[in-house]
């Protein structure tokens, strides 16, 4: 019996020994683990499972560290069976060569890029359990140059190489969508990419002193033609505000080659060239001679240089070639003109309204000279446009500096959280402030009803198809009085106030040849989109040392003048800001915008104190999320900042033909703006 047990024990030992020997010769075992290994020779490979690093080249229960599985290591052979290895932590021990596997070799592929829409893990080996050596961010490019065992061999941007699984990645092949060429520039040096993705290879640099042309788009990138290829720049890094094909933002930056301070020193307003004229240096174009005594507009100063616009041209002039026109200088110049044709009369509404325009505004200057008024601008650059701005108290609390306002929670689409804005009036806020300060505060809302309801109530001078405006705009001007309020829906809402005609302010065909046929068309005072206002406030933000305004988002407009009914092809200036085009006239340095009626859905004109008393009542301020205390003694006759004004929500549309900002009656923070405007501009009630 004992002999049988001993025989079984010997047999079991023999089987185990055979299995052990067979295991050493299993497929996948390193060919380099043979006795051919020479002492001092180095071997590189990995272990399929964790390996204990022994303190001596013998089997024992002791170990100094553990080598993780599927980790590439380089060992030094000590004899035919053992090799030494030093860990990254500096611990040295011994491992069995027989268990080391060779690093797989990959088959080479033609290099191309891949990316993941979420993070992509790059592993040390083409084994799922291999350690992660790099994690590529979403949309970061990885270079593929080979494959093995279902994995791709890749290089990261920093040179790290490893393996990824193909699933979850996309080949970086892009076809830009062609567009009408767009002129763009950048506010600061910006890199171009060879692919429209983060992590793409650099393909050159855009500099602030040049204009560039984009001929395609690809997602959030503009595509620029580079021979037969495309180069890409993020849309967020470019500024689309072109002045006859050029970018006006360039006026806020120091010209290339100009020494001295890089920042803006001063913000100017109207100016003229000296008797000898000057030379307009235009980025990306030939220099242009400007005649003596030419009316220009200055936006910024850089040491001896200024950024200036002359008609439809823009660029840089030397400071010595220009002189600014203060209100006093303009007043003296006007005295030399024959203003006998001017018929505008003193009016308390105009006294108040002209306090909100920029200093040096020619209409303000002529009004003062013709009527004996002494109106002065409360703010040198005028009043910014602010969607939902109705508070007179807030407007003037920091005179003569601007008040700022952080993102307004009642309009999360228009106002960006964490962003500061220059505070100002919206269109209703401006009209109501002028009336309140003139002593005749408007009752109720201006936009709480559609035109048909006002027409049916008889509360109108003109009202859409019930009593339409005459086809001849000159006739319309003859029947309107200063202070008449026009409300238009397109289908959003905009309010503006009649101020007279060009002829009323003493302008002649000789003074304004481009407007010679339109001297008797209606002029309207408004708070709305105006490219010159936008440029002034951009300059202010760039130049200011006030931390509150330095980080502010510029307004897209302000209080200014527009003219009704003039065909846009007659415009002197065609200015594009944020993909929206404006048609303007240069009136002594003042940008007068063209206000067409091509997309107006309905309208009405009423006169406060006359038929306005019959306007249907509407609850003012309903739904406002942020209000100043109603009846605040500091406000204009108790005027509250009530952003809603009782409007009801409706669907909005894109911008119309006249470059207006689409607005929709919403109870949020404005007078009926559409926060989903397609024109690229903030959805402002103008």
Image (cartoon, grey):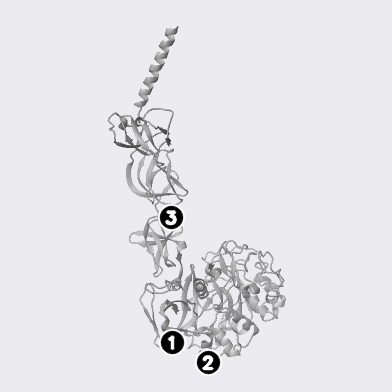
Give the vertical position of 669 relative to 558 (above or below): above
| Callout 3–callout 1 Cβ contact below 8 Å | no
User: Where is residue 418 drawn, in percent x and y?
Assistant: 56, 62
Within 10 angstroms of label 1, few (less than 14), some, or many (20 or more) residues? Answer: some
Along the line of sight, which residue is nearer the eye, 149 or 565? 149
Q: State the image coordinates of residue 383 (x, y, percent, origin top left).
A: 57, 75
Q: Residue at x 45, y 50 (%)?
A: 137
Q: Residue furthest top?
A: 1
Residue that label 1 marks? 293
- Upstream in the sequence, badge 3 or badge 1? 3
User: Which element is circle 3 on?
Assistant: loop
- Could you tell me if residue 218 is visible in this image? yes
Q: Percent position (x, y) of residue 112?
A: 36, 49
The quarter of the rendered structure image containing the N terminus is top left
- The label number, if any, that marks residue 186 in the structure image: none
Mark 3 nearby-residue class (10 Å; few <14, some 14–19, many ≥20): some
- According to the picture, the residue beneath numbered tag 2 turns out to be 335
Q: Quadrant of residue 24?
A: top left
Displayed quadrant of residue 495: bottom right
Q: Secondary structure at mark 2?
A: helix
Q: Nearer the N terminus, badge 3 or badge 2?
A: 3
- Which residue is labeled 3 in the image? 198
Task: Tell me the CA gap for discs 3 and 1.
Answer: 50 Å
Q: Residue at x 38, y 77 (%)?
A: 281
Q: Quadrant of the C terminus?
A: bottom right
Q: Is residue 76 left or right of residue 141?
A: left
Displayed quadrant of residue 529: bottom right
Mark-to-mark CA distance, 3 and 2: 61 Å
Q: Does residue 483 appear to the left or right of 546 in the view shown?
A: right
Left or right for 657, reference 86: right
Q: Which callout, 2 or 1, points at the residue further toward the start of the chain? A: 1
């Amino acid at each position: 019996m004992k002999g049988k047990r001993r025989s079984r024990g010997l047999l079991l030992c023999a089987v185990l020994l055979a299995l052990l020997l067979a295991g050493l010769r299993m497929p996948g075992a390193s060919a380099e683990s043979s006795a051919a290994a020479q002492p001092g020779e180095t071997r590189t490979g990995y272990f399929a499972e964790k390996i204990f690093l022994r303190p001596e080249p013998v089997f024992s229960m002791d170990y100094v560290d553990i080598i993780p599985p599927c980790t590439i290591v380089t060992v030094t052979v000590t004899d035919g069976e053992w090799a030494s290895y030093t860990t990254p932590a500096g611990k040295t021990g011994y491992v069995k060569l027989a268990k080391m596997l060779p690093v797989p070799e990959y088959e080479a592929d033609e290099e191309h890029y891949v990316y993941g829409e979420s993070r992509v893990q790059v592993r040390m080996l083409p084994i799922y359990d291999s350690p992660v050596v790099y994690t590529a961010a979403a949309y970061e490019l990885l270079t593929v140059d080979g494959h093995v065992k279902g994995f791709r061999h890749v290089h990261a941007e920093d040179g790290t190489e490893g393996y990824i699984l193909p699933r979850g990645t996309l080949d970086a092949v892009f076809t830009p969508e062609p567009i009408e060429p767009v002129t763009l520039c950048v506010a600061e040096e910006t890199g171009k990419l060879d692919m429209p993705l983060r992590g793409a290879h650099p393909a050159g640099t855009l500099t602030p002193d040049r204009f560039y042309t984009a001929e395609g788009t690809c997602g959030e990138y503009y595509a620029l033609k580079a021979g037969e290829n495309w180069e890409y720049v993020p849309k967020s890094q470019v500024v689309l505000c072109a002045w006859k094909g050029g970018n006006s933002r360039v006026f806020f930056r120091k010209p290339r080659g100009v020494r001295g301070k890089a920042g803006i020193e001063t913000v100017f307003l109207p100016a003229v060239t000296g008797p000898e004229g000057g030379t307009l240096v235009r980025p990306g174009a030939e220099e242009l001679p400007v005649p003596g005594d030419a009316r220009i507009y200055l936006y910024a100063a850089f040491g001896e240089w200024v950024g200036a616009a002359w008609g439809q041209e823009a660029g840089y002039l030397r400071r010595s070639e220009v002189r600014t026109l203060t209100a006093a200088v303009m007043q003296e110049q006007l005295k030399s003109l024959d203003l006998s044709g001017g018929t505008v009369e003193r009016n308390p509404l105009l006294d108040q309204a002209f306090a909100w325009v920029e200093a040096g505004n020619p209409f303000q200057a002529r009004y003062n000279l013709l009527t004996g008024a002494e109106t002065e601008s409360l703010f040198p650059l005028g009043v910014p446009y602010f969607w939902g701005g109705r508070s007179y108290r807030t407007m003037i609390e920091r005179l003569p500096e601007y008040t700022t306002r952080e993102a307004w929670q009642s309009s999360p689409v228009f106002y960006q959280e964490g962003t500061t804005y220059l505070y100002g009036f919206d269109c209703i806020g401006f009209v109501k402030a002028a009336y309140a300060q003139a002593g005749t505060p408007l009752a109720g809302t201006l936009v709480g009803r559609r035109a048909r309801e006002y027409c049916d109530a008889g509360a109108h001078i003109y009202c859409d198809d019930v009593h339409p405006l005459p086809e001849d705009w000159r006739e319309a001007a003859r029947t309107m009085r200063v202070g008449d309020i026009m409300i238009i829906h397109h289908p959003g809402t905009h309010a503006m106030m009649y101020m007279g005609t060009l002829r009323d302010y003493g302008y002649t065909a000789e003074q304004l040849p481009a407007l010679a046929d339109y001297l008797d068309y209606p002029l309207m005072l408004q708070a709305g989109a105006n490219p010159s206002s936008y440029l002034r406030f951009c300059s202010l933000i760039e130049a200011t040392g006030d931390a509150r305004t330095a980080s502010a988002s510029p307004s897209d407009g302000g209080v200014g003048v527009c003219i009704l009914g003039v065909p846009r092809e007659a415009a002197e200036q065609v200015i594009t800001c944020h993909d929206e085009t404006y048609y303007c006239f240069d009136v002594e340095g003042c940008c007068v915008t063209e206000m067409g009626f091509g997309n107006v859905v309905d309208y009405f004109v009423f006169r406060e104190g006359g038929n306005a008393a019959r306007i249907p009542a509407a609850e003012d301020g309903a739904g406002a999320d942020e209000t100043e205390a109603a009846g605040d003694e500091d406000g204009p006759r108790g005027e509250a900042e009530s952003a809603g004004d009782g409007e009801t929500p409706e669907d909005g549309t894109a911008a119309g033909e006249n470059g207006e900002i689409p607005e929709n009656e919403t109870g949020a923070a404005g007078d009926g703006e559409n926060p989903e405007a397609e024109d690229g501009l903030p959805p402002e009630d103008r």
